[in-house]
Amino acid sequence: MILARFPIPKHWKMCCLSKRFLTLLKSGEIYKIRRVIGFKEPSVFMLASGEKNWCAFDGHFRSCRKLPIIPSDYNFEWGNKESFSAGTYIFVSGKEVDGGVVWRYELATNEWFKGPSMLSQRCLFASASCGTMAFVAGGIETTTREVLSSAEKYNSESHIWEQLPRMIQKRKSCSGCYLDNKFYVLGGQNEQKKDLTCGEFYDEDTNTWNLVPAMFKDIPLSTPRSPPLIAVANNELYTLDASSNELKVYLKKSNSWKKLGPVPVRADARLGWGVAFKSLGNELLLIGDTSASYSQRAVMKIYTCFPDPHVEKLKWKQIVCSSTNLHPFIHNCAVMLA
């Protein structure tokens, strides 16, 4: 029980001291015990511009370690990728020479493994996580380029993808989140490249999708742009409006958005691309650059805040991470709670 509460960043140091601990760690039993006793801590995984290795940080950004390089091909390395988490796994979806592929990183063994692939290979899709489960929906089929309405759920304990009912609306370049115990898919474009202001959510209890009309009506849309930058903290939905560089909170009762002031990172510099905006437990995490133009010497800036939907302007705290000097353009970022 004591070992289960040992901080994750210290695990690999303990392995150098004890082969018994290494065996226990690789079995995954420690993480199962942590899950049973409800002891979890966030870890942040990201791939910054110019890097081949993903980096893993503890939730306070006091430690950083490089993960092994994903043993994929040139197409995957330089192509577009999406990332998400489930349980003690990080998933990176992309396209190799032979087609779409999903690579998974296992925290217990510190290794990358290929598969299992989604039932429908896709890119530019929405994703969200809840405990050991991950949800994906929509996107573009990697071979036919068809805009999809299909959705899937992944069980990280059984390593099986399960087909879910189709969404009401086909959509690509959309974003997902887990809110009110439901999988939400927001924004994006349909098969006619029309911007979508509606959202929809999947209810596991009824096994159905429900439309939320005009959910994104208060968010200005510009093309080309990144998928919506959204995050959930304390069961409240937040979005970073890349056009105005403002943070907004979703008001569920009125189906509208309230402004919470500007953010310290210039999301508007690349229309949302290259910025990491994530949930970090009860905090919001923001990673990018404070300048509108990236230079060779620029390094990423990290900010967090404890959001309050009732205030007029949030206070952001800069996190100084002395262990790394990564480029501020972040290609992929995922948060693991384990």
Image (cartoon, grey):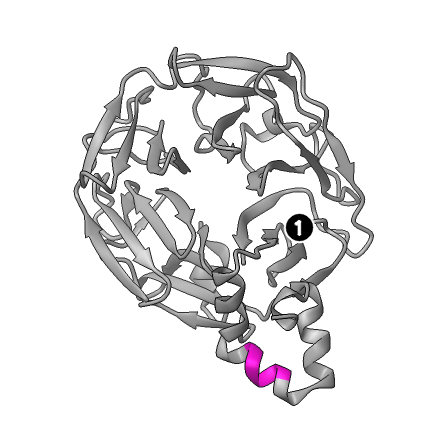
Element assignment for label 1? loop
Badge 1 crowding class, 10 Å Cα cut-off, few under 14, some 14 to 19, many 20 or more, is some
In this picture, residue 62 sits left or right of residue 89? right
Q: Position of residue 208 (x, y in %)?
A: 18, 36
Q: In this view, does 181 lie above or below 72?
A: above
Q: Does the magenta stretch include residue 22?
A: yes
| Res 217 quadrant in image | top left
Q: Residue at x 71, y 40 (%)?
A: 302
Q: Where is residue 193 in the image (x, y as percent from the top left)?
A: 28, 27
Q: Position of residue 20 (x, y in %)?
A: 62, 88
What residue type is disc 1 on?
Answer: Gly
Question: Count of labels shown?
Answer: 1
- Is any part of residue 106 visible from this angle? no
Please identify the quadrant where the C terminus is shown: bottom right
In this picture, residue 329 sits left or right of residue 116? right
Please identify the quadrant where the N terminus is shown: bottom right
- Is any part of residue 258 visible from this angle? yes
In this picture, residue 38 sits left or right of residue 12? left
| Res 165 quadrant in image | top left
| Res 148 quadrant in image | top left
Q: In this view, does 115 lie above or below 188?
A: below
Q: Residue at x 44, y 65 (%)?
A: 104
Q: Does the magenta stretch include residue 236?
A: no
178 or 149: nearer the viewer: 178
Q: In this view, does 103 lie above or below 12?
A: above
Q: Where is residue 259 in the image (x, y as percent from the top left)?
A: 57, 13
Q: Residue at x 44, y 28 (%)?
A: 224
Classified by dominant secondary structure, the portion drawn in magenta counts as helix
100 or 313: nearer the viewer: 313
In this picture, residue 37 sits left or right of residue 165? right
Q: Mark 1 sits on what residue? A: 59
The span shown in magenta is: 21-25
